[in-house]
Amino acid sequence: MMVEKSNALPRSFWIGSSLAFGVLGLALLVSLLQNPRLKISPLPVISRIADFTLTNQDNRITTLADLTNRVWVADIIFTSCAGPCPRLTMQMKSLEENLPKNSGAKLVTLTTDPEHDTPEVLKKYGGRINADFSRWNFLTGTKKEIAALGSGSLKLSSQPVKLEDQKSVADLFIHSTLFVVVDKHAQMRAYFETDGADWTNGVLPKILMTIHALENEP
């Protein structure tokens, strides 16, 4: 008998997570980005992002050209995940909320589970946290297409869990918990581990400073 997967986490989880992560105060954010003592080291080019063709939550084709000339941050999840994915999504949401209004940065979330995570499913998933779809794309495609961008260009690994090792119907994939930052020229320039890290006072400020630095590069 096939067990239907559910991608709906309790509303109380999303509300609680939103309160837990919170947002940085505007004054703190401004001082963080403008303080001349808070400089990051020059960022190396880690890899180049190969062209891709995927489909977003609005069932629209999305390619590398849609992100060129923008700094963007990417992660990888699947919507029925009961492990790190809800945390990653709330962290990406807090990044969205803390981006300066004059920033053109984009956010990209890839799914590891395209068979379940259709554009419609991704739209509902993002809608539950009021994701700004003008800035944040949730992308799906064939497994080969996702792997080419995810593990190939972005170094976001994902491996299916063998059926005999699955602890629940939602225990489908082991995947990276990284946030990857790509510059305006489609070059991967930084990555940040989120698992076990201090998000609000550690990782989030570093990502914001990285975005700020890359947006000010030629």
Image: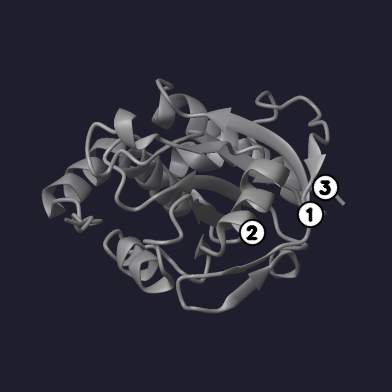
Please rate how many residues cluster around mark 2, counting C-alpha atoms within 10 Å: few if below 14, some from 14 to 19, many from 20: some
Report whether 46 appears left or right of 201.
right
What is the three-letter code of the residue carrying label 3? Glu
Instruction: Give x and y (percent) for residue 27.
Output: 45, 41
Q: Which residue sits at x=64%, y=61%? A: 104
Q: Which residue is mark 3?
A: 217
- The alpha-carbon separation of the residues under discs 2 and 1 comes to 11 Å
* Amino acid identity at mark 1: Ala
Nearer-N-terminus badge (1/3): 1
Q: Position of residue 25 (x, y in %)?
A: 39, 42
Q: Is residue 179 above or below residue 97?
A: above
Q: Disc 2 or 3, which lies upstream in sequence?
A: 2
Residue at image coords 61%, 76%: 61
* 2 vs 3, front mark: 2
Give the residue drawn at x 22%, y 37%. 168
On residue 145, the disc is 2
